[in-house]
Image (tube, coloured by chain):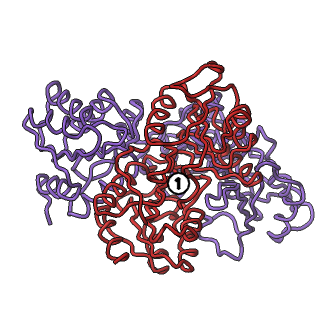
Chain colours: A purple, B red
Amino acid sequence: MKLYEYLAKGRLKAHGIPVPPGLLCRTPDEVAKALEEICPAAVKAQVLVGGRGKAGGIKFAQDPEEGRKVASEILGMNLKGYTVEQVYVEGKIDVDREFYVSVTVDRNARKPLVMASSHGGVEIEDVEDKYIVRRHVDEAFGMQGYLARDIAAEMGLEGDVAKQVAVILQKLYEVFRTEDAELVEINPLVVSGGKVIAADARLNIDDAALFRHKDLPAVAEGTELELKVKEIGLAFVQLDGDIAVMANGAGMAMATLDALQHFGGKPANFLDAGGGASVEPTAQAMGVLVSMKPKAIFVNIFGGITRCDDVANAIVQVKKTQGIPVPLVVRLVGTNELQGVEILRHEGIEAFREMSEAARKAVELAGEVR
Amino acid sequence: MAIIIDQDTRVVVQGMTGNQGSFHTGQMVKYGTNVVAGTSPTKAGQDHEGIPVFASVREAVLERGADASIVFVPAAFAKDAAFEAIDAGCKVVVMIPEHIPVQDSILIVEYARFRGAKVVGPNTYGLISPGKSKMGIMPNHIYAPGPVGLVARSGTLSYEIAAALTEAGLGQSTAIGMGGDPVVGQVFNDVLHQFEKDPETKACVLVGEIGGSAEEEAAEFIKTMSKPVVAYLAGRAAPPGKRMGHAGAIIERGRGTLESKRKALEAAGVTVVEMPWEVAPAVKKLLG
């Protein structure tokens, strides 16, 4: 789960990392009032997309009236598909230098990875490798003081700034650990009049660890349909094609999309109906596909733990209640295959055995054959 | 021969009396796995399908000689379960649960390294050495003993490919699920090292997917391998920034793309096929 900037900064502040003063506002009036306290200020759209500044989502104000004016421009605007509902009014700071610091998970090393650079203020992907310091941390032992000092020195920092950065690095690691972060990033970490401050921050929390962080407000990310299907408890991603897809297992679902594309088709979604889903969730998943009004529906099942008769019954249930008004292609093999095929045949649906043939047929019925 | 588990592996099932644990214990016993004990916080002292249930893994090791554990407890308790198994002396720990916090997984893997244990998963379907033993939730009937070492990130996709291999007369030495999470104990690299040393394994199949760079890392080792490798990679149709079911299957900030994996594997001499149904014919061709 990605946190909004104001939430991320709140967590950093709680761990003792200096951040500029700021207030969250929902209306131009609130912004004008905030400017009476914090002035001059940046008025920043709170959305979960990068590049807000360039897209017009960050504006500056010198007094309450200007605050009201820029807030009315930003609030309600559409930023890369997201409507801006909140702005963060934050004290403007003079920037002398910009650094980059982050802690994330190195999947190959299977350890936390600290990255730091004296070349901050741009995306880290755009920084030359020789300017990036990378050090792993043994999670069982945590980040010791020497490591933080080492990193600051390797960044080329000296004196009081190096000391402040080293302290911030240790606190940043503490945020990573205690908040169950996948990523915590300060970019830029600025030097302003000799003081080191986090000017912008990203904090992504591990979804699997949210049960330990009940104090965090839920931040919903995704399209309306994605959020709806998420509530059912299925993994679902909306795509821009028109063949709706259901498969069991994440890898199988990915391979199914690939197969459709291979034959010239355009998948409308990714849907993992689960490695061992029974009739009810499978029927719910089918219902979602029908509601998307695709040109065709492709169901690709390799029954291991999933039983083919359960899938067949789910399809029949949806056909009888909701109706399936578009061409349907079903590939069904594995556990209880014969029963499943028979149940479908009874309803006039002929199941395929081969994934390749079935995918080709789905593309053909959607009228997209190359 | 096979890797990691065989007919001599003595298995304890952690969380044996729960729904999943109970069902899959039955399936494992049916397959011939030597399940010697189970654990349960509430049913210690009882028998479950003729298998003694203990309160702790330590007892299962002391009284029944268990040396490998398969974990079916809920994700929130999985770290504790893994530490318990490793501390009791289990040298193989198979972590079935999905949605284990990634920082818990880091600690599990660190502790396993420290104690010389192998962790398979989390979020894995387990592993099977056909005809000998299985520790996992895979269907029993799709595998056969033979020369192919199979390692995959994903369960059902790997079943699809295992079944096609078996149908083509290509059995498996061991088939293992790396797991769909960002941090797992046995990565492609670790598994391929073991397949290279295993005399029964004549060829390897790697089933990868978008996200991370375990495939690229494996490619470095494959360059030095004597055995041929065929790879299928899933997720070419996946958009960046979206998690495709698995927590680890995501293209983030330009990293983890299929193209980067394909290039690295091809440069290492791997036969990278386009579609899952092309795997078995490609292996057949390589084995002659």
Q: Chain of mark 1?
A: B
Q: Amino acid at mark 1?
A: Met
* Mark 1 element type: loop
Left or right, B204 with respect to A241, comes to: right
Residue A69 image point, x, y percent: 53, 42
Q: Please name the residue that numbered disc 1 is placed on.
A: B178
**Is residue B286 or residue A354 the one in the foreground?**
B286
Residue B71 image point, x, y percent: 59, 38
Residue B236 image point, x, y percent: 36, 62
In which quadrant will I find the C terminus of chain B? bottom left
Instruction: Work out whether A181 lies above or below A151.
Output: above
Q: How many marks?
A: 1
Give the class, few, some or many, for how many residues have Cα within 10 Å of label 1's Cα (few <14, many ≥20): many
**Is residue B137 or residue B97 the one in the foreground?**
B137
Left or right, B263 with respect to B94, comes to: left
Q: Residue furthest right?
A: A159
Say whether residue B213 is visible.
no
**Is residue A343 or residue A192 the one in the foreground?**
A343
| Residue under the image location 54 percent in, 37 percent down | A86
The quarter of the picture where residue A87 lies is top right
